[in-house]
Amino acid sequence: MFGATRRLHQSSVNEVAREPADHLKTASAFIPTSQISPISHRHAVSRLTRTSQRAGRSKHGAKSDARTDKPKCIVVGAGIGGLVTAGRLAREGFDVTVLEKNSEAMVGGRVGEELVETSKGRFRFDTGASLFLMPEIFEETFSSLGVALHDAIDLRKVEPPYMIFYEDGTALNLTMSNRALLKEQLDQLEDDGYDKFMRYLDAADGNRLFGVPNFIQFEFSFDSINAFLKSLLSMWPLSSHHTEAGRFFSNPKLQALVTFQDLYVGLSPYSAPAVFSLLQAIEFKQGVFYPVGGYHTVAKKLLQIVRSLGVKVHFNTNVKEILVSRTLLSPSGYEAEGVLIDKPGRDDEAAKLEASLPRSRLRDMGKTAMMVSSDIVVVNADLPFAEEHLLKTPPALPSFAPSIGRDFSQWDYSTSVVALYWSFKDRLPLNHHNIFLSSEYRTSWASLFDTTSNAAFNASAFNFYVHASSRTDPSACPEGCDNIMVLVPVPALDERMSADEQQRLVDRTVSDAREGVLRRMEAVPGMENIRSSLLHEFVRSPMDWKRLYNLRRGAVFGLAHPLRQLVIFRPGPKHPTIGNLYAVGASARPGNGVPLVLVGAKQTAERIVKDFRRRFGSARFIDDDTGEGDKGEDGGGAATRRLFWHERRGKEVEAVK
Ligand SMILES: Cc1cc2nc3c(=O)[nH]c(=O)nc-3n(C[C@H](O)[C@H](O)[C@H](O)COP(=O)(O)OP(=O)(O)OC[C@H]3O[C@@H](n4cnc5c(N)ncnc54)[C@H](O)[C@@H]3O)c2cc1C
């Protein structure tokens, strides 16, 4: 049974070409970035003019053309970050096309779902995100797209937020609604355990109040950088989260209870700054929620909404490269001209693409590739992958994160996970979110972030998470059964090893993790027979995460969040040199986790609009429905607006000439 994978949705995942295709060497107007050479002023102008004409734009920005010519934007990836950025830009009047390499069933990227049919009926699994946190950020996102969150998603509070299973056989119900029960359990672990826990949460809430504006909602400006640097100094000397927990609790079980969440930001509690206690304030003070129908309903709803806003979303469309050229029209000297895609294999997909995009924006680049031109490109594919494989900029150009450079092996990555998806014919004594903690807590983290070559999963000391969504949403599996997702954090893939060596290590890791989890779970009273209760299983290994979503090193949470990769040091929403290239997603600012990615999508979309206005200052908004014009920079709040920008761009071309 082990390893048997049966999916209702068969994803079609295209391989990404590593080398620029040969046929590109003959293309004159659009060259792969690896072949960029400086071009003259006049060439730059004539290239842009040709591009504009090919794209159906008038060289002089004639009014009739301008009325239909919205600025074109391509978003690479239909993850949550890509969808929301696309929707926000569509509402601002941009003509947005999303290109996603996977099938429509996999929309939302890491906010995924799998359905499994068994003799007992259908089991539904969230394959990635399962903890729905910070609902206020979702509310803002949905309302920015014109929909109330509660109309789109049926959200339930999860109570208790967590059940903790210690390796010595004890368990703790971390209920926040039954305070008497919580007090009884915490006081048993340590004198005044409950009072200390409450004091810890108050301090954590202070970190939340400080951290959310400074680390998450941070918007780049001279003043905000100053404020951020000052706030860092005020936190100095920075103690680790685990040290901070030690100031409140002497019992290692309680210290572990308030620090295991650091995994979500790709850090060990022994190195994570204490400010990350904000995670506990978010979970225990605000609460943990769950969308009925599964977390993936959020992605499906977003797809529906952005389509209704006019965004064209193409699945099974693998982007091979972002095409960049030098231009004197961009203040920074470089512009993305569009993207190179694998030509859709099936006729109906090719036809769909051609039907939704004007012929003038598509260009055949040989048998297997096609170029799609665009005024703006937004990268939602995870940045460490995109930087190396999609953006083959000349080495002299900086990365999205100039402070950490273009040597991607030097960046700090989060861990990977071995994910086990189990359909049980019986119901297990679990709550919705369950954490199994190792009694060798320090060792369990050390091996995860071991950077020595050949570092392997430590099967004798590890923590894991168990998701049983049917506790909150009974529709997730047949009555009396259980749909269980287990996430076992394991080291990210080691790129110094050959592919075969990596595969061998991963096979061993999966088998050790699976056996270790089964042993830990069957030691819990009521779960002794889980092996015989198992109806069906499928597994995702670090290699699978890498292949399915292009996650470098299979690091499921993308770039980690040490101080050197936080806020101004983390890849920003805008490329420092390529004027019209932007990024959104877990490895960009502000960071990993769906709520943070939503904040990032807002910041990226706002940045694009701001840059556009700055550059094409005469841009005017006109209400599509009423035809009323020139409502000023705020566009008069119309539901659908058109941004008339091309007149100005035409003038810019003339001016450079
Ligand atoms: C196992 C797991 C558990 C998690 N648990 C939680 C949780 O409980 N709560 C929470 O808030 N967050 C959680 N997260 C994190 C959260 O899922 C991510 O932070 C978030 O979904 C990332 O969204 P994104 O848009 O940045 O990227 P992605 O979801 O990775 O989307 C990027 C998209 O780009 C596509 N793409 C990549 N390359 C190309 C290409 N060349 N051409 C076209 N398309 C391409 C990918 O297929 C993908 O669809 C979890 C993640 C994982 C993996």
Image (cartoon, rainbow, N blue to C red):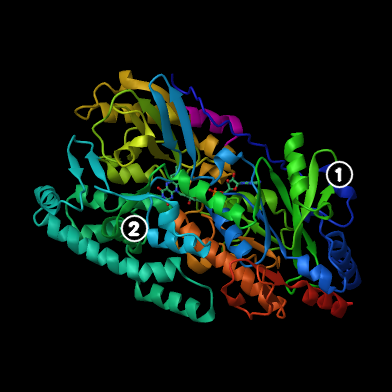
Residue 399 in view, yes or no:
no
**Residue 200 image point, x, y percent:** 22, 62
The residue sitting at 45% across, 25% down in the picture is 117
Q: Secondary structure at mark 1?
A: helix
Give the amino acid type for the residue marked by disc 1 in the picture: His
Residue 568 position, x and y percent, is: 52, 69
Is residue 203 found left or right of 330 in the rendered image?
A: left
Q: Which residues are magenta?
A: 496-507
* Residue found at x 50% / y 45%: 110
Residue 133 lies, in percent from the top left, at 37, 55
Q: Residues within 10 Å of mark 1 (few under 14, many from 20)?
A: few
The extreme front residue here reads 626
| Circle number at residue 554 | none
Left or right of 436 in this view: 506: right
Q: Quadrant of the C terminus?
A: bottom right
Examine the rendering and report whether any part of residue 309 can be seen: yes
- The image quarter in which residue 170 lies: top left
What residue is at 34 percent from the left and 64 percent from the top? 275
Q: Earlier in the sequence, mark 2 or mark 1?
A: 1
Q: Work out whether residue 435 or residue 239 is closer to the camera in this orientation and state it.
A: 435
Q: Residue at x 86, y 44 (%)?
A: 23
Q: Nearer the viewer, residue 286 or 476?
A: 476
Report crowding for label 2: few under 14, some 14 to 19, many 20 or more residues within 10 A (C-alpha). Answer: many
Residue 512 rendering spot, x and y as whole percentages: 39, 28
Which residue has dot 2 on it?
A: 279
Q: Secondary structure at mark 2?
A: helix
Q: Is residue 652 left or right of residue 632?
A: right
Q: Which residue is mark 1?
A: 23
